[in-house]
Amino acid sequence: MSHTPARFALNAVARLRDQREEEGIKPIQARGWRAPRCRDCRVIESHCLCAWRPQVATRSGVCLIMTNKEVFKPSNTGWLIADVVPDNHAFIWSRTEVDPKLLALLSDPQWQPYLVFPGEYVEPERVTNSVDVDGTKRPLFILLDATWTEARKIFRKSPYFDRLPILSLLPEKLSRYRLRRSTRSEHLCTAEVAALCLDLAGDEAAASALDAYFDVFSQHYLDAKHQLDMNVSTPAHAELKPYVQSVTPLVD
Ligand SMILES: [Zn+2]
């Protein structure tokens, strides 16, 4: 049973996980992770993140293309994007078949889909570095939420993406972002890429909320892993706070 209050938009990644579980597909249990996890945020219960879920309105939508494995990973950050962006969609990729709902979404006239992928791997005429914010269509960011090897395979073997413009994030944008957030890792995770896309689309509040939410998630996740007490007075929590509505916890 989900305990997420109904005031939140549905999280499409959570729904995929629930569907997989109903089909009898189980995650491979990692060793040393026996502590019970919250169903709604996947963090170990003592460090539950649910009270920190932000609420922001966005013009943009997101569509996550995932592997089966990602859906079950407690560290997957596509889940966080789906928590923040109300219009969120998620599909499990398969080489042999495509969900008709994905095709319907791609041709829905309210959306202008952008496939987010590094431009150096694509014919230059398909690549754009900006998002059309003045058009009547709302931007829909398609994010390949998988390892880099898997993402390349998805990119090459999904003919239905061939007609879409490729949104490539400029290196200077990326390095400025890394500098601002003092991110040490060379590769941005999917949530960080999504925050950059939202920012490009003029959804600045959602971009800031997602960045702060990702930082707060990482901290809860790592503190739980290292059996440290939960600390909610960090700069990231302070940054996230304006986007979180104070709620009375649901009693069940
Ligand atoms: Zn939780």
Image (spheres, helix red, strand yellow):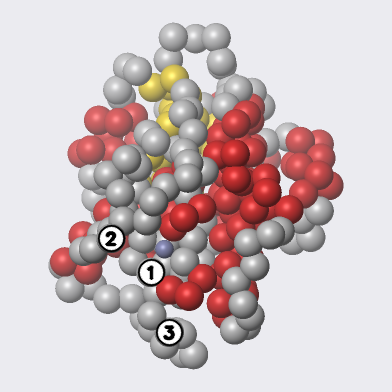
Residue 94 sits in which quadrant? bottom left
Q: Is mark 1 within 8 Å of ligand 1?
A: yes
Say whether residue 160 is left or right of residue 197. left
Which quadrant contains ligand 1? Answer: bottom left
Furthest residue to the left? Answer: 23
Q: Position of residue 67 (x, y in %)?
A: 39, 60
Question: How many marks overall?
Answer: 3
Q: Is residue 189 visible?
A: no
Query: Reading the chain from its start, which is encountered first: label 1 or label 2?
Result: 1
Say whether residue 113 is left or right of residue 251. right
| Disc 1: which residue | 38
Amino acid type indicated by mark 1: Cys
Tell me which residue sits at (83%, 47%) in the image. 179
Q: Position of residue 188 (x, y in %)?
A: 66, 53
Image position of 70 with respect to 158: above or below: below
| Disc 2: which residue | 251
Q: Position of residue 104 (x, y in %)?
A: 25, 30
| Disc 3: which residue | 35
Mark 3 closeness class: few <14, some 14–19, many ≥20 residues within 10 Å:
few
Q: CA distance from mark 1 to mark 3?
A: 10 Å
Q: Position of residue 197 (x, y in %)?
A: 59, 34
User: Mark number for residue 56?
Assistant: none
Amino acid type indicated by mark 2: Val
